[in-house]
Amino acid sequence: MLPLTFALALSVTTEAESAPATVLREAFKDRFLIGTALTASQLSDPASVALITSQFNVITPGNEMKPASLLVAPGRYDFRDADRFVDFAEKHGLEIIGHTLVWHSQSRAFLFEDEAGRPLPRETALRNMRDHIMTVVGRYRGRIKGWDVVNEAVADSGGLRETPALKAIGPDYVEKAFRFAAEADPEAELYYNDYNIDLDYKRESGLKLVRDLRAAGVRLDAVGIQGHYLLGTSIEEVQRGIQAYIDDGFEVMITELDIDPLPRRGAGGADVTAEEREGMDPYRNGLPAAVQAELADRYGRLFDYFVTQPKITRVTFWGLTDGDSWLNYFPVRSRTNHPLLFDRSFQPKPAFFRVLESAKKIRARQ
């Protein structure tokens, strides 16, 4: 059951010509899909299920379809949690995105390396990658809307990241992965997904990769821009970057959206001192009103732009509520973060209502 205040909010109706007041999927139904990333445990939590099914029309398994979650050993798979996601989506009339087929993290070394950690021969690694993609995509053929085929292949320093797949196969591993996925399910949409490829320092490398895929004749249905932003991230830079992909003819999806309001210093991580952690976890008792307002403004400015772009076809939040966010553990463990539209009590925050305000611009433009 949803908390009382939010359940009451859902009962509010509005004039037909105005944007729906309290439901994201209704507010943006004429513009783009609106989604959330989930864990398997949330699929059986009543409060989570009520919020998911009332607000969103597309879901992404946060971890359950990654190679490390599916592959138990060479040729052995555990599909139980992934199956739960697909069954849940079908039961509730939701679209589902497969995340992710090829990634250097949360993978299995034996796909691309031998027992000594050396790259496998190219043909062996290609066969392993093809077998994995054909097995996973083939299992859900016709049931998954689209796949993040390759995740985070672009290096922060430019060019391709030195991943096990790159070392074993070569730079065409990205192209090959897309061809294998298209073979496994010709009807599923295929995406390239990455972080910060909209920002100035990484944009040209991101554009080069997707342009090269297009030039090779690969089917690339959308570029996934993750959208992990800070309060201080320049909205103008984000818009400029997204627009570069759109202007180049690519469909864009915002695939992992959140805005981190907590301070960051350096890389963070497990080695920060107790004193540093104290200073980097300032909102354990909730966001101050001024920070709530700033978070709402940042989200609003993003969505004000999103709704003006017909080639943005999906926006997915990376988490359901603040309590579920990965940012409670990254880049510093065990902090209390507040990056999403719903708080730890499943209540909508000011950012939620500011995002809904952006939907009114859809009808204004029609």
Image: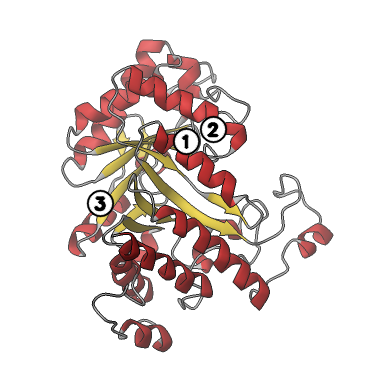
Q: Quadrant of the N terminus?
A: bottom left
Q: Nearer the viewer, residue 358 or 259?
A: 358
Q: Could you tell me if residue 318 is visible in this image?
A: no
Query: Residue beneath label 3, please?
Result: 83
Separation (CA) of disc 3 from disc 1: 37 Å
Q: Is residue 345 left or right of residue 200?
A: left
Between residues 239 and 2, which one lies in front from this camera angle? 239
Q: Amino acid at mark 1?
A: Ala
The local secondary structure at tag 3 comes to helix
* C-alpha separation, residue under disc 2 versus residue under disc 3: 35 Å
N-terminal of the two: label 2 or label 3? 3
Q: Position of residue 229 (x, y in %)?
A: 58, 52
Determine which residue is flagged by label 1. 244
For mark 1, give the secondary structure: helix
Q: Tell me, for residue 203, which label it has, or none.
A: 2
Q: Residues within 10 Å of mark 3 (few under 14, many from 20)?
A: some
Q: Nearer the viewer's eye, disc 2 or disc 3?
A: 2
Viewer-closest of 91 and 222: 222
Task: Answer few, some or many: residues within 10 Å of disc 1's Cα (few below 14, many 20 plus, some between 14 and 19).
Answer: some
How many angstroms separate mark 2 from mark 1 (CA)?
8 Å
Q: Quadrant of residue 171?
A: top left
Q: Residue at x 28, y 52 (%)?
A: 96
Q: Is residue 348 above or below residue 215?
A: below
Left of 354 or right of it: where is 21?
left
Amino acid bearing label 3: Asp
Q: Which residue is at a point 46% across and 74% down the rendered structure image? A: 353
The amino acid beneath tag 2 is Arg
The numbered mark, 3 or 1, whose residue comes first in the sequence reads 3
**Front of the two marks 3 and 1:** 1
